Image: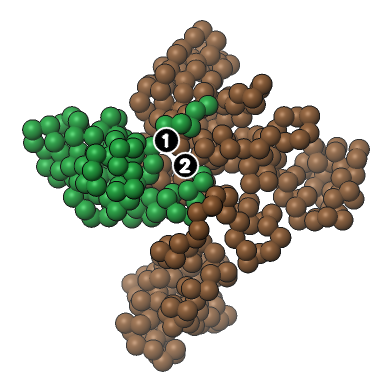
């Protein structure tokens, strides 16, 4: 397991050689060990509230843990406030609506101090930074700062946070069908799109959408036939309808859903192709 | 760090749960008169927003402020989100942030 990763990952190779953690963790859950190792270097999208709620790990390193994953580097989006520029660094507070966190950015080069002038109170910014946890105080050491220009990024970031939370908490839950919910809020059936996030586990969605889902799968299966895969221009819609023996309206509804999901795209007028056709 | 004064993501439908509290929402401003803006929420309801300066009509504005009633907000902070904004994604985010994933936000 570690011999293959040693070619490109010095850290993993070193720790593997010294302590053989692969053997130690093998007994419990190999996939867990792998994800932990890899996630240690990842950039986690988080809300300030998640950082506030993060558990302090029990080892000496004073690491924080969110959804069972060690947090080092994080990406946040929020409004900048209380900016204070100094000669060697700039400090500000980032308010992402769920909470506020103190941030600082050190200047390495002269160009950095010019960049600091572009940081203004009230602006929305995307940050990448290293989370520091010192004497119970959590601050962010920023190494990347970019003003947000397309504000869809704000909603997108929080959806990202939800997605990563779901991904990390589901990997760690031993029963795949059981959803890991951090708070006490019950899962309300009002959220129809819940079905899209976790298609295999949600029974409600399958019940009311079984007819449509069936059509979509039939369309996908048809597009995946080798003869159809090889066509650069995709398959004409009449042909799909004719082959599946369904009405054009029903077909177009299925195709629209597949396009929305990103499974299928239109090549030229009225010709469709699956994304895994290559 | 401070999470004592959050601004909750809401659409018009969710405002009644937060009257007197700090909220954040995105609206499209339709009209402006006498210091009060009339705006459309991401779930297609009419809201009145107090305390907004003159903003470009039909632009999407993010408002952070106190919910005064189920259809009016007293704005503290506002940001012009421009004239293209995916209201549907935002609307769904509001529901997620107040439902299953509330723990990430509040």
Q: Which hue is chain A drawn in?
A: brown
Name the foreground residue: B23 vs A205.
B23
Quadrant that contains the C terminus of chain A = bottom right
Q: Is residue B47 left or right of residue A54?
A: left
The residue that appears at 68% across and 46% down in the rendered structure is A68
Would residue A146 be visible to someone looking at this image?
A: no
The spot of residue B19 in percent (x, y) is: 30, 42
Residue highlighted by disc 2:
B106
Up/down of B50 relative to A3, above or below:
above
Q: Choose top left, top right, bottom left or bottom right for residue A153.
A: top left
Q: Mark 2 and 1 residues: CB-CB less than 8 Å, in contact?
A: yes
Residue B65 at what x, y percent from top left?
A: 29, 34
Give the structural element (helix, strand or loop) at label 1. loop
Q: Mark 1 points at which residue?
A: B6
Instruction: Tell me which chain the residue with mark 1 is part of.
Output: B
Q: Nearer the viewer, residue A203 or A212?
A: A203
Neighbour class for label 2 at 10 Å: few (<14), some, many (≥20)? many
Chain B colour as displayed: green
Q: Which of A168 and A186 is in front in this view?
A: A186
Earlier residue among tags 2 and 1: 1
Q: Can residue A15 be seen in this view?
A: yes
> Is residue B5 rendered to the left or right of residue A58?
left
Q: Do labels 2 and 1 share a chain?
A: yes
Chain for disc number 2 = B
Residue at the spot 39% in from the left edge and 89% down from the top edge: A246
| Circle number at residue A257 | none
Q: On the rendered structure, is A107 left or right of B87?
A: right
- At horizontal 51% and vertical 7% (from top left) the residue drawn is A87
Residue A158 drawn at (x, y percent) = 46, 45
> SS for tag 2?
loop
The part of the image, by quadrant, that contains residue B54 is top left
């Amino acid at each position: 397991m570690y011999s293959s990763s040693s070619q490109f990952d010095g850290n993993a190779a070193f720790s593997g050689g010294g302590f053989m953690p692969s053997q130690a963790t093998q007994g419990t859950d190999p996939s867990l060990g792998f994800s932990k190792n890899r996630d240690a270097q990842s950039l986690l999208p988080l809300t300030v509230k998640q950082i506030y709620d993060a558990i302090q790990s029990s080892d000496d390193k004073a690491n924080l843990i969110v959804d069972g994953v060690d947090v080092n580097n994080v990406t946040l989006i929020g409004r900048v406030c209380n900016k204070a520029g100094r000669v060697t660094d700039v400090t500000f507070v980032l308010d992402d609506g769920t909470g506020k966190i103190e941030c600082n950015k050190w200047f390495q080069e002269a160009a950095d101090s010019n960049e600091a002038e572009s940081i203004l109170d009230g602006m929305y910014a995307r940050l990448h930074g290293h989370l520091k946890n010192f004497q119970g105080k959590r601050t962010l050491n920023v190494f990347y700062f970019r003003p947000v220009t397309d504000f869809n990024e704000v909603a997108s970031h929080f959806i990202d946070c939800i997605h990563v939370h779901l991904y990390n908490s589901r990997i760690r839950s031993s029963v795949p069908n059981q959803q890991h919910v951090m708070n006490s809020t019950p899962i309300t059936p009002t959220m129809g799109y819940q079905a899209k996030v976790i298609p295999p586990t949600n029974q409600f969605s399958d019940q009311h959408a079984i007819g449509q889902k069936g059509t979509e799968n039939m369309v996908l299966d048809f597009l995946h036939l080798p003869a159809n895969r090889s066509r650069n221009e995709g398959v004409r819609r009449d042909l799909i309808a004719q082959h599946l023996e369904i009405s054009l309206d029903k077909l177009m509804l299925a195709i629209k859903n597949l396009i929305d999901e990103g499974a299928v795209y239109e090549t030229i007028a009225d010709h469709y192709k699956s994304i895994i056709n290559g | 760090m401070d999470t004592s004064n959050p601004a909750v993501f809401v659409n018009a439908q969710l405002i009644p749960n937060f009257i007197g509290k700090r909220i954040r929402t995105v609206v499209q401003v339709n009209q402006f008169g006498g210091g009060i803006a009339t705006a459309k929420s991401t779930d297609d309801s009419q809201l009145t927003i107090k305390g907004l300066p003159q903003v470009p009509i039909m632009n999407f504005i993010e408002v952070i402020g106190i919910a005064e009633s189920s259809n009016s907000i007293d704005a503290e902070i506002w940001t012009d989100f421009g004239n293209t904004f995916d209201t549907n994604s935002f609307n769904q985010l509001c529901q997620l942030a107040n439902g299953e994933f509330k723990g990430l936000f509040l």
